[in-house]
């Protein structure tokens, strides 16, 4: 997140929340603790009943985050109407004493909306993490206030895809911000048996009898299917169910009581990984009702980070994104059967499951979510002149049912789609791989970043230059290193990574009659290479994010492009005009997006373009005591006839790619219609391991601690002489329409990651030239008309 500057000070962030800061550590704490690095955060809790004069207790939670606890003699719960007349002057006096002239107001509950009248908000944020109106004992005014809050909000976040789809039609600037995870916090590899947390977790569970442990942690309320919990316990008395969390809004007497069910009550966030460590299976036994229709449980990803098999009921925001990883139980019998299946997984099956979990986890983090929020907050503040603080305060006081009446006849300003989300952007970049990120970065250097939209269909940036983190190992999506003769590329990498970058002379193991490497990412033996010390090659991609001052639309696909009208239609529902467009996506996909507007000859030519796929079989090999590595090489040729064509030695690119006591290798297999894979799944892994031993890379005495596969379909463009006429025609047609094609896939030419950074810079310079030329033509036309 960018730091505040004297030129553009960030206002305090005033947050109204229905959850207490010291309650279960979840979304508000994760996001706001990170935002407090750059905002002063004032977290206003619901009032606590206390006789005597009303007051605000201040509880520091860090150098820049403070919890405000109102204590009032009013007995009504929450932000009840009866509380508002007491809270408003308390807040107003606090703001006066702190000399807070304006603020950015953030709501987790619409019930606090009338309190905005006591503030001077430059912008309003609604983080709709749950459908609160569906919860037990929801106030009757909640829906009315949410409607008002939606109208006055500058930006709206939702807690998951299902809630996003429900709120999306109600506001022009709604963003899906699903639950995320702090992977490091839950990673089993970091847990120390001698820590105080580990010893406390052991003490809490010491009395539990032996047997498979099935655990749940979270709030125990009306959203849990308690009958299902009882059915699981009854079906297998030898299983031990461990339930961790506070009991809220339901009678504790309604909890099922069985000899094999243990309730441990609310426990701290720091303790959860240690409590989970001895569990064999994690449960999400949610009821399927109105209160769970829109939930997006944070624990899904936390269980995965703890590398535990998971069984859940058919909650939409669990099943849709993670149904291939989490076993979904559709009724009690199927749920119990799912538990049986997950407990019976073999060690090899568990390794493959954990590999899929870690691939999913690599796409999310609370740090990344906070960066997204910070960018959207900056955009909201830049656009805040449209709604003056006075207008926002008046809006909050309009509805008589809210307990405040307006003293002014002014008409409130209500945001419209046009005000919050303009129908045009100056620059559009399709694809957030290395080329697209470089293009957006260099547009920012021209002071054009704030009016740039980068569209990426995946959930994360990096394109083909991504990495995965699995059981302590880091593997790249194919071999990627930084080898460029362009001094600006080297300087850019050093600016982005700082001391997280090291340079190495390549060590390559050659063989006679090597396997052909057509379709593999190019590597050179005659030039030093750069590589991140930590985080794999993905670290270089992620290093762009804090430097970008543009909108980054992830999980968003280009549906249609009209080069003549300069318009696009995206699958997030937006139709936008653009001044310039840089495309880094594969040329066949770009031509297809143009539909019938692309000439038939162009469409036919695009179908002839050849592309190859890549399968990486990633291995973590155990090292004998005293042995540091399997080889000194950074990459290795292999003899023809080997199932793979090259080995990228991840563990030598950076020692931090290795798990403790292990060594990382990636065996690359180029394949396609003319060169299919010899087999799939575990059989392919076995073939790779056998060939590694056959060529002497490691022996049968070296244990394989970890094995997984990464499949990269359409990983490489394979241009050849027969395609040149079609390529020339396609490039010329897009050039005539001012569409800039950039990068390996965008121009359909054989280039590696280092060239991508140069290509992005050149694309940014080209669009700036195009704008200047258009401006000159417009000026000339106006002069001639005059």
Image (tube, rainbow, N blue to C red):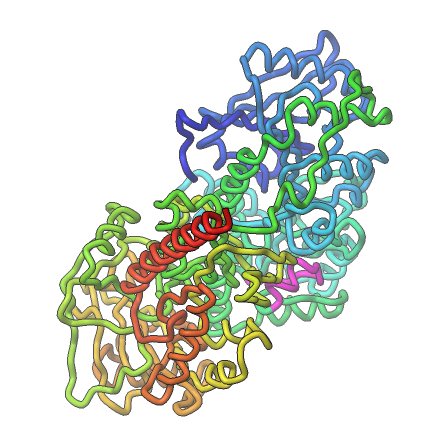
Side of 232 relative to 566 (left or right): right
Q: Is residue 43 magenta?
A: no
- Front residue of 297/721: it is 721
Residue at point 38%, 50% (across, down):
443
Q: Position of residue 225 (x, y in %)?
A: 76, 54
Q: Nearer the viewer, residue 335 or 596?
A: 596
Q: Is residue 362 above or below residue 149?
A: below
Find residue 146 and report its image quarter.
Answer: top right
- Determine the residue positioned at 50% across, 60% down: 456
Q: Is residue 711 visible?
A: no
**Quadrant of the rendered structure where residue 567 is?**
bottom right
Tell me the residue at 57%/74% (across/down): 597
Instruction: Write the start and end of the magenta stretch as one range.
Output: 309-323
Is 656 rendered above or below residue 171?
Answer: below
Residue 105 x %, y %:
62, 29
- Where residue 699 sits: x, y (%)? 24, 79
Residue furthest out toward the top: 53
In terms of image quadrants, where is residue 37? top left
Nearer the observer, 696 or 765 = 765
- On whether residue 312 falls in the magenta region, the answer is yes
Q: Nearer the viewer, residue 378 or 654?
A: 378
Image quadrant where one finds the N terminus? top left
- Count the marks: how many? 0
Position of 683 with respect to 486 (left or right) is right
| Up/down of 644 relative to 162, above or below | below
Instruction: Pinpoint residue 252: horizontal percent, then vertical percent.
Output: 77, 40
696 horizontally vs 289: left or right: left
Left or right: where 260 falls relative to 352: right
């Amino acid at each position: 997140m960018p730091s505040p500057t004297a030129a553009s000070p960030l206002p305090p962030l005033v947050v109204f929340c229905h959850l207490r800061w010291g309650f279960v550590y979840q979304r508000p704490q994760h996001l706001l603790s990170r935002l407090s690095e750059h905002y002063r955060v004032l977290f206003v809790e619901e009032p606590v009943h206390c006789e005597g004069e009303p007051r605000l207790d201040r509880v520091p939670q860090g150098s820049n985050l403070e919890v405000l606890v109102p204590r009032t003699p009013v007995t009504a719960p929450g932000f009840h109407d009866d509380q508002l007349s007491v809270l408003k002057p308390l807040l107003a006096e606090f703001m006066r004493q702190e000399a807070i002239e304006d603020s950015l107001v953030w709501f987790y509950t619409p019930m606090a909306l009338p309190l905005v009248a006591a503030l001077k908000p430059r912008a309003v944020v609604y983080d709709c993490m749950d459908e609160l109106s569906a919860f037990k004992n929801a106030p009757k005014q909640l829906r009315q206030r949410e409607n008002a809050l939606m109208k006055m909000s500058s930006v709206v976040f939702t807690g998951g895809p299902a809630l996003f789809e429900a709120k999306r039609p109600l506001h022009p600037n709604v963003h899906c911000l699903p639950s995320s995870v702090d992977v490091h916090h839950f990673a089993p590899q970091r847990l120390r048996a001698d820590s105080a947390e580990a010893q406390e977790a052991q003490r809490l569970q010491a009395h539990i009898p032996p047997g498979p442990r099935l655990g749940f942690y979270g709030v125990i309320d009306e959203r849990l299917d308690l009958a299902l919990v009882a059915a699981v316990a009854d079906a297998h008395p030898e299983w031990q169910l461990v339930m961790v969390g506070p009991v809220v809004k339901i009678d504790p007497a309604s909890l099922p009581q069985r000899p094999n069910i243990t309730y441990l009550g609310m426990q701290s966030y720091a303790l959860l990984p240690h409590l989970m460590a001895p569990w064999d299976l994690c449960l999400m036994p949610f009821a399927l009702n109105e209160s769970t229709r829109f939930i997006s449980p944070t624990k899904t990803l936390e269980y995965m980070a703890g590398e535990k098999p998971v069984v859940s009921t058919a909650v939409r925001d669990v099943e849709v994104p993670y149904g291939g990883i989490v076993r979904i139980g559709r009724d009690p019998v199927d749920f119990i059967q799912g538990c049986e299946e997950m407990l019976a997984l073999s060690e090899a099956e568990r390794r493959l499951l954990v590999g899929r979990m870690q691939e999913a986890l690599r796409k999310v983090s609370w740090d990344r979510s906070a960066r997204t929020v910070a960018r959207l907050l900056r955009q909201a503040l830049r656009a805040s002149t449209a709604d003056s603080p006075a207008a926002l305060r008046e809006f909050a006081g309009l509805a008589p049912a809210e307990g405040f009446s307006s003293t002014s006849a002014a008409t409130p300003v209500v945001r419209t789609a046009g005000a919050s989300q303009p129908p045009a952007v100056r620059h559009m970049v399709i694809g957030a791989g290395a080329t697209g990120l470089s293009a957006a970065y260099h547009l920012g250097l021209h002071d054009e970043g704030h009016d740039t939209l980068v569209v990426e269909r995946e959930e994360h940036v990096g394109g083909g230059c991504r990495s995965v983190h699995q059981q302590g190992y880091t593997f790249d999506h194919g071999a990627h290193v930084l080898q460029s003769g362009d001094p600006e590329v080297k300087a850019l990498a050093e600016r982005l990574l700082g001391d997280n970058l090291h340079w190495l002379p390549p060590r390559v193991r050659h063989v006679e009659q090597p396997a052909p490497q057509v379709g593999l990412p190019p590597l050179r033996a005659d030039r030093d290479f750069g590589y991140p010390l930590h985080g794999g090659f993905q670290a270089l991609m992620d290093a762009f994010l804090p430097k970008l001052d543009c909108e980054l639309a992830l999980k968003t696909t280009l549906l249609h492009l009209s080069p003549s009208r300069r318009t696009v239609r995206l699958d997030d529902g937006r139709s936008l005009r653009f001044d310039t467009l840089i495309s880094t996506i594969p040329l066949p996909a770009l031509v297809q997006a143009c539909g019938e507007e692309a000439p038939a000859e162009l469409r036919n030519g695009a179908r002839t373009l050849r592309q190859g796929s890549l399968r990486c079989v990633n291995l973590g090999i155990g090292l004998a005591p005293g042995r540091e590595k399997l080889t000194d090489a950074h990459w290795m040729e292999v003899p023809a006839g080997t199932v793979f064509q090259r080995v990228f030695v991840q563990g030598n690119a950076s020692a931090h790619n290795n798990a403790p006591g292990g060594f990382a290798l990636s065996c690359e297999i180029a394949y396609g219609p003319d060169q299919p894979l010899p087999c799939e799944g575990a059989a392919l892994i076995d073939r790779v391991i056998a060939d590694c031993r056959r060529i002497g890379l490691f022996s049968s005495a070296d244990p394989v601690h970890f094995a997984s596969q990464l499949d990269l379909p359409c990983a490489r463009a394979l241009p050849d002489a027969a395609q040149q006429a079609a390529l020339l025609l396609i490039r010329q047609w897009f050039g005539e329409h001012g569409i800039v094609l950039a990068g390996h896939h965008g121009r359909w030419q054989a280039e590696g990651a280092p060239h991508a950074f140069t290509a992005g810079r050149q694309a940014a310079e080209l669009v700036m030239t195009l704008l200047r030329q258009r401006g000159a033509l417009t000026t000339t036309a106006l002069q001639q008309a005059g």
